[in-house]
Image (cartoon, rainbow, N blue to C red):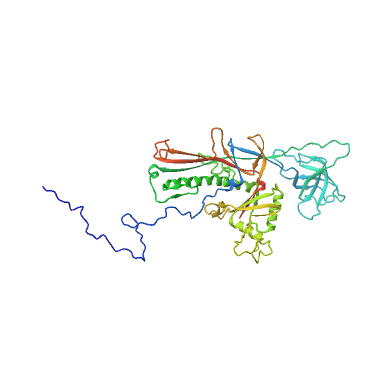
Amino acid sequence: MAGSVQAVPGFDLQPSSEQVALSTNYITNFDFLNQYLPDTYEKEFERYGNRTVASFLRMVGAEMPSNSDLIKWAEQGRLHTKYTNVTSAASAAADTATLTINDTLVPGSEAIAIRVGQTIMVSANAGAATLYNKAIVTAVDTAAGTIDVAYYEAGGQTFGSGVACSLFIYGSEFKKGTEGMDGSLEADDVIFENSPIIIKDKYAVSGSDMAQIGWVEVTTENGATGYLWYLKSEHETRLRFEDYLETAMVEAVPAEAGSGAAAGAGVTYKGSEGVFYVVNNRGNVWSGGNPSTLSEFDSIVERLDKQGSIQENVIFLDRQFGFDIDDMLAAQNSYGVGGTSYGLFDNDMDMALNLGFKGFTRGYDFYKTDWKYLNDPTMRGGINAGKINGMLVPAGSTTVYDQILGKNAKRPFLHVRYRASETEDRRYKTWVTGSAGGAATSSLDAMEVHFLSERAVCTLGANNFFIFED
């Protein structure tokens, strides 16, 4: 039987041309079934700019190795002795009195640091400015927490019995031919500690997806380029992890006793003391809106006078706090309200007027810089309750006793300690597992990129920090 041409598939009699969209319309049907191709931008548009928020600790701190699950350091106590909760058993005008020290004493000492022969000033905590005396200590009862004093003033005690007072030691006086000071004082150190936490992340991609080409060119903050989409995802995981290395040190809190983290089912987490936690508990806190007048900053200066009196300080702040400081400084100029003379300039029409300030001096040197972490809407910038507007950080370093070195060492006020030894460095670990992307560690048809760090932040001299909250 003779063969024949099969009817199907056949030949098409439909015209190859068709009515096209008018110039007033848009072509939206982009597919491989028609001849129209879109005009594409291969590179992503970076509409959020640099999306990373890490920079704070790199600017103010340093990183150092640690060999233990516990980091301890000693900070100096006060040099001079002062008590602020003192009452007298004597009535006004008495020449002598027994004073009771009601302050919480140094843990482990439980003894008042006042000795016979020392001279003190006693001042009422409230009331008239004349309610004060100077006296010499004639007897000390460390068990009862009382001292006997004799006043130098002929009018005797200026305040009444039971009035809350403060006292401080300013010297001593002894008669001729007498024995020396009875007893001695031991230096007082305050011991602080913190524990490192383990931070992890991972990115995984199948071998097939690694071989899949894309039409969008990868662009990331660290310069990765190419048309393999997994490169972008892997690099963004890396950037996100690097941000977490800093934000975890800023935000970490210890797990409180009885909390779910500390007493969970089968697991126990300890947490760590982050910068915000430490400053809130051992530092200085400003609340109720940003300080925006010189008188408000004067109260900050007065508090710093009572602390370490560090001359140079940097305020890391959000945008509104920065504007408030700019406006406060501009108002000090005689034209600050009705004009734009924020400083010296030549009134050049081509000049861009600078309405901001980098810092100012008011008792101490204050410098300010924007902290992106507080402005970013995906982080601190997007919250209401618990909002933090800025933090004042003392510049420079401080001397502490390092338990590892066994001696005094200079350390920045803020620094990170990461776990490391001769055989294991956990500052920033990354490794690849699987059977794709050059890895050959398992039969898994994928590439897994792992990230790990173990670290803690040490906030030395937290009494010199200020945190500004709403």
Occupied quadrant, residue 353: bottom right
Query: Front-most of 458 and 289?
Result: 458
Question: What residue is shown at x 39% (from left), y 57% (from top)?
Answer: 39
Residue 232 visible to an observer of this rendering: no
**In terms of image quadrants, where is residue 334?**
bottom right
Between 279 and 325, the residue placed more toward the observer is: 325
Does any portion of residue 32 appear in the rendered image?
Answer: yes
Is residue 429 positioned above or below 362 on the image?
Answer: above
Residue 417 at x, y percent in the picture: 59, 40
Which residue, as the protein is rendered here, is positioned at the far right? 176
Residue 48 locus on image (x, y percent):
50, 54
Report the residue at 65% width, 39% height from top.
73
Quadrant of the snapshot with the C terminus: bottom right
Of 314 and 100, the residue lying toward us = 314
Number of marks in picture: 0
Whether residue 239 sits left or right of residue 349 in the image: it is: left
Q: Residue furthest left?
A: 1
Q: Position of residue 199 (x, y in %)?
A: 52, 42
Spot occupied by residue 206 in the image (x, y as percentages of width and height): 40, 43
Q: Residue furthest top?
A: 423
Residue at (54%, 43%) from the top-left corner? 261
